[in-house]
Each structure stands twice: as C-alpha cells, then as structure tokens.
Amino acid sequence: MSFDRIREKLNILADAAKYDVSCSSSGGTRKNNNKGLGDSHSSGICHTYTEDGRCVSLLKILLTNHCIYDCLFCVSRKSNDVKRAAFTVDEVVELTMNFYRRNYIEGLFLSSGIFKNADFTMERLLLVCKKLRLEQNYNGYIHLKTIPGASDELIKEAGLYADRMSINLEMPTEAGLKLLAPEKSHADVIKPLDFVQKNIAQFSADKKLIKHVPKFVPAGQSTQMVIGATPESDKDIMYTANAFYKNFSLKRVYYSGYVPISDDTRMPVLGTQPPLLRENRLYQTDWLMRFYGFKVQEILNDANPNLDIDIDPKLSWAIRNMQHFPIDINKADYKMILRIPGIGVMSAQKIVQARKFGKLRIDQLKKMGVAYNRAKHFITCVDSPYQLKDYQGTQIKAFILAESHSKYLKTDSNQLILF
Amino acid sequence: MIYVFDGSLPGLLTAVFEWFERKPGLVVLKSKDAFQPEAFTEVFFVNNDAEKADRVWTGLQKKIKKEWLRKFYCSYLSEIPEAYQHLFQFTIYIFQNEKGAEANYGNNDVMALSKYAKSVEREKHRMEAFIRFQKTGDGMFYASIDPDFNVLPLITNHFKNRYADQQWIIYDLKRKYGLHYDLNTVEEISIDFSADVNKKNPAAILMDEKEELYSLLWKDYFKSANIVARKNTKLHVKHVPKRYWKYLTEKQLG
Ligand code: SF4
C-alpha cells in the first residue's frame, strides 16, 4: 500500500469514527489456544489516552465514511462537505495485525457509513472479521457495529467472530431522533439488538447442554446516546438507558456529550462547549444503577428530573434522604454502606470484612480508602465525635461544597472521582 | 534486635522461620543493602535456607487465600525497604492467628500489604498497557522498560499468552535483566549494551523496513482520535503520568 494514501485514509476514517465514545475492550473471553496472535483481557486494557483524557484501547475506524443517509448529528452525513475515503478489507486486516503486534491496541472497533445498502456494508464488515479470525489466527478483541437493516443471516454470522456488537440509539427519545434523522427510528435499533440478544441467550443455553458451542458475542452488546443535541431531560435519558439495560441485557450504555459539527438550526450552534459535566453526572448515575444497587427512580423522578450539577448523584440522593442517616458502620448492611457518600465498592467490602475482627475506628476507615471528610456527615463508628446538632441536608451540602470547592468546579470531565 | 537478610524472597521467609525458633520479641528486618550497623542494637544475620523458606511458604499457602499469596508476592516485588518489615510482621501475625486473619483490614500490616500490592499491580498493568514493541530487522519484537517496581515476573504470562506467534524481548534497563520469548518458552536474559548502542532505540538500520510506517500510522491515529473540543490535559496526564511518556510511540516527536 502506498505510504501517503494509507495515511490519508487512516486520518479520515479514524477522525470520522471518534465520536463513538465506546472504546472498551472488556468482557472478552477469547484465549489464544491456536498459538496465534492475541487474547482477551477480561477487564480490558487502555493502551493510551487521548489528550482529552479518553481511553484508547481499540483501533477505532470506519470502513468507509461514504453514506447514503443524512443524519444531522453525524459528520459522515451525505450532505456534509468532507473528504471521503474507504479502506479495503485487506488494509483493515493489515493495520489491525500490525498495531496489535506492537502492543498499541487491544483490538479493532470497526464501524462504517452505509454505502449502497445495509447488507452490502455488513458483508464487508463480516469479511474483515473472518479474515482476521480464520486466516490470521487473530484472537484479539473485535467490536463490530451491527448495521441496522442488515439481514439476520449476516448479523448472526458476524456474532460468531465479534466479541462485542453495538448499535447506537443516537438520541435518547424517538422524538429527538425523528427531529434530526427523520429516516431513522428506535425500532430499527431495537430489532437487531433484540435479535442478537436472543442469539446470545440461545448460545449460552446450548453451552450448558453441549460441550463445544462456538462463542457468540461473548462480551455482549452496547449502545450510545448523544447528549445535549436535543432537549431531553436527564430523567428521559436514564429511563431509556435503564429500559435498554433491562430489556436487552446490555453491557454498557454510553453517553456522548454532543460536539457541535453542524450549523443546522435544529442543533446547538458550532463552537458550543460539549456538556462534559452533565455527561459525567450521567455516567455516575449509570454506575449507581449498575454497581451500587440504586433504582433509577430513586435518583431521577418527576420531582427531580435533572441531576444536580454542583454535587454528584450519590450525594444528592443522600441529602434528599437524610432519614436513613447516620449509618452505623459497625452494624449496617453492606447494601446501606454502599450508599454512604465517600465510600466506594472497594472500601465497603473492606469494612464488612474488617469489622468481624473488632469495631472500626475513624483512622482505620481512612486507611481503607474512605473519603472521611465526606462520609463523616453520614456515619457513626466507635470513636465518632458526639454530635450536638442534627444538621439538615442543605447544611451538609454547604459544608461539603465549601471543603472541596475548587475540585467541583474543575471536575474532570470523564472521571468518576467523586464517590 | 535487627535481622539482616539478603533481599531475596527465600531470605525473607527464612527470617520468619528463625524468628519462630528464637522468639526474640520485636524485630526490625532489613535487607543487607539497607542495613547500617548501630552501636547498641543486636544484629542477627539470616542465612538463606531453602528448606526453612519452603516450610514457611507452604505454611502461608495453607493459611491464607490465593489472592493474598499474590498480594504477599507483589509486596515483595515492590522492593520498598519498609515493605520487607510489613511482610515479616504480616507472616508472623498470620501464623499466630486463626485462618482468615488476612481479612482484618484494621491490622496495620494487612493494610500495608494491600496497599503495596495495589501499587505493584498498577505498575504491572501499566507495563501491559504502555509497552511498545519495535520490530527489528530479524523479526524480533523489542521493548525496553524501567518500571518503578520489579514487575517482569508478573507480566511474563500475559505477554507469553498474547504474543505466542512472534519472538519478543522485554528488557528492564533499571534491573538489568529481561525476558526473551523464542516461540516456545520465556527465558531470562541479560544484554551487554556496549557504550555506543542507544538502549531505548536500537539504531534505525536495525529495524524492520515497515517499522517506521506503522509507528507513523499509530502517531497519526493518536492525533485523529483526539477531540479538540474536549481537550483536558489534566485528566490526560493523570492517566498517563509523564514518566511513562518515554515508552509511548505516540508521544515521540516527528
Ligand atoms: S447512517 Fe450512520 S454514518 Fe450514515 S449519516 Fe447516519 S449516523 Fe452517520
């Protein structure tokens, strides 16, 4: 391949792919049993981070940015005046193999604009996967976009080679989607998500009965919603996310703060800052749902349709529900300990193990990684100072904000540091 | 009372054995590199004894969970002088208590090991992430590192399993030894770098002809993947501390 041409293609097709924020390489189970190249690392590996602080784990590219559709929120939309390019199947295979061999990446994330039609596109994506797996003995990670509208046979075959598949919801509600992409609907996404999910379930049921069942999308499915391009509330967004987690057993939902790329009047104007803090709060809510035992209705409801910007959702919940506090560290259920602001999953686990050996003191909690200055408002342990006053939630919020003022205003956009 | 051992794992384990034989009360354990004679403190030099070390190790295996054996080993690999003391006290504590005592995070030594292990595991994980191989003219994939802790023993399996169909070398410049995988087994090697060889970048002529292309494509990719509107240098540096930049192809100029 010619040096300059391949560089140009990579620049165009990596640039067009970057708005898909998922870069996770987790959940894979593939082993390098055939003495080929690569395997899966169960929790994934970030090989580097972009200058905006996002994990780079996969070679994330489009096969082509030619597209017959005209979705307003997308750089590759038909009407957009950008340079177009297309990789050949072999070019993608060679890039993947050579990047992987140098330990640059965990694998490939392949997506594509729709050229000609859905099946034509899906066929080529499938071809890349097959070449990697069957010809190159490649066992590294593959995240493949399911092309909505592609035939069941193609999607099912792709599932035999990919570790993860995903289709983006794009907008959190049908109304939002219709506004910016009239040709599309959530139903187009739901159908293939459901089809893949049913197959995953079928394969794992077979596995219990038969010994050698091939892998089928072992790392599961994910989706992405664009945040802030359309006027949905945080409640709308998280209720949609919750429903998709439940109905399609998704591994992840990604929230991507809209980066203005169009001057259409239906969208935020060019140059508007992407809503990074909001995005961060949504991810925190997502974590609370998945790892902290919160129901989405506890965090967002008609009385509280949007997340607080100045404090994280766990603290917001605690302050709204002071009747549960203070919690006795030496007695309370693990479930309740998880709900204390300033205590994460790791320290909660340490607490319940350690208290079997004797009642815990403040200095021990600190050593276990508890953010004591935050947690102290919500807990008692053996040597907790005697509290004269019963503080109100709003007062506690003021204390905590005063203590960590600068930290909140300059919150790192993608980081879940506030727990 | 000071116990001095040679810095090796068998040495450390032998020290524990000797303590139980003598029960001298409070003991400070030092490696011989860190040891400085003090006028009024009694000193005992531990003589490595494979059999005694083995007995202590087997005892530990019986008493603590597998993940804690790993934490023990990781703490040892940290090479931090105070870690030896905690390892020593931890082992005594474990033998003096019922099974399951390692879950007592209220105990100082338990907590200390848990912390050392976390740092060492993080460094191990960083090496798995940040190592960049360069393909040399004879088909060898080469990378050099100088990790904060002695993590080569911990990363061997990862690289062996993953890069099973290519020969590779990972060399620890600080500790002057490396791993070489020859398509069958991994062996420890040491390389005698003559003065005029640049350790980090073996001269360009020794490289595979495609090496430059792929490192260039990777740098391009790194630039393309960035979203300028989201720039966040603080977060970037938090994830990739500057001391690791020297490993990263994408961080080299040109
Ligand atoms: S179909 Fe996909 S690639 Fe094409 S314009 Fe819509 S979002 Fe972009």
Image (spheres, rainbow, N blue to C red):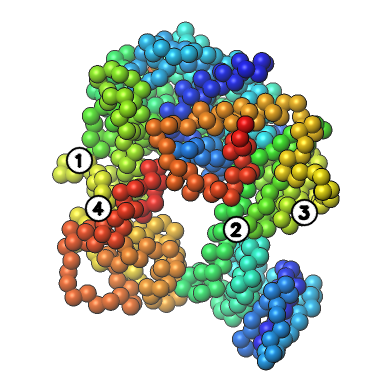
Chain under disc 1: A
Give A124 or A417, whichever is nearer the viewer. Answer: A417
The answer to the question of whether label 2 and label 1 lie on touching residues, with beta carbons closer than 8 A, is: no
Q: Disc 2 or disc 1, which is closer to the eye?
A: 2
Query: Is residue A217 shown to the viewer in this render?
Result: no
The residue singled out by tag 4 in the image is: A317
Drawn side of residue A254 relative to residue B141, left or right: left
| Element assignment for label 2 | helix
Estimate the spatial distance between the alpha carbons at disc 3 and disc 2, rounded to whole Å.
18 Å
What residue is shown at x 75% (from left), y 26% (from top)? Answer: B209
User: Could you say where residue B156 lies in the image, as x and y percent from the top left?
Assistant: 70, 49
Estimate the spatial distance between the alpha carbons at disc 2 and disc 1, rounded to whole Å.
43 Å
Kindly indicate whether the residues beneath marks 1 and 3 are on one polypeptide chain. Answer: no
* Residue at the extreme front of the image, as rendered: B196
Q: Quadrant of ligand 1?
A: top left
- Does residue B197 lie above or below B99 as drawn? above
The type of residue carrying mark 4 is: Trp
Instruction: Tell which circle, 1 or 4, labels the residue nearer the N-terminal end.
Output: 1
Kindly indicate whether the residues beneath marks 3 and 2 are on one polypeptide chain. Answer: yes
The residue singled out by tag 2 in the image is: B120
Q: Residues within 10 Å of mark 3 (few under 14, many from 20)?
A: some
Chain under disc 3: B
Estimate the spatial distance between the alpha carbons at disc 1 and disc 4, rounded to whole Å.
13 Å
Q: Residues within 10 Å of mark 1 (few under 14, many from 20)?
A: some
The type of residue carrying mark 3 is: Tyr
The residue singled out by tag 3 in the image is: B177
The residue singled out by tag 1 in the image is: A305
| Element assignment for label 4 | helix
Quarter holding residue B165: top right
Give B21 or A385, whichever is nearer the viewer. Answer: A385
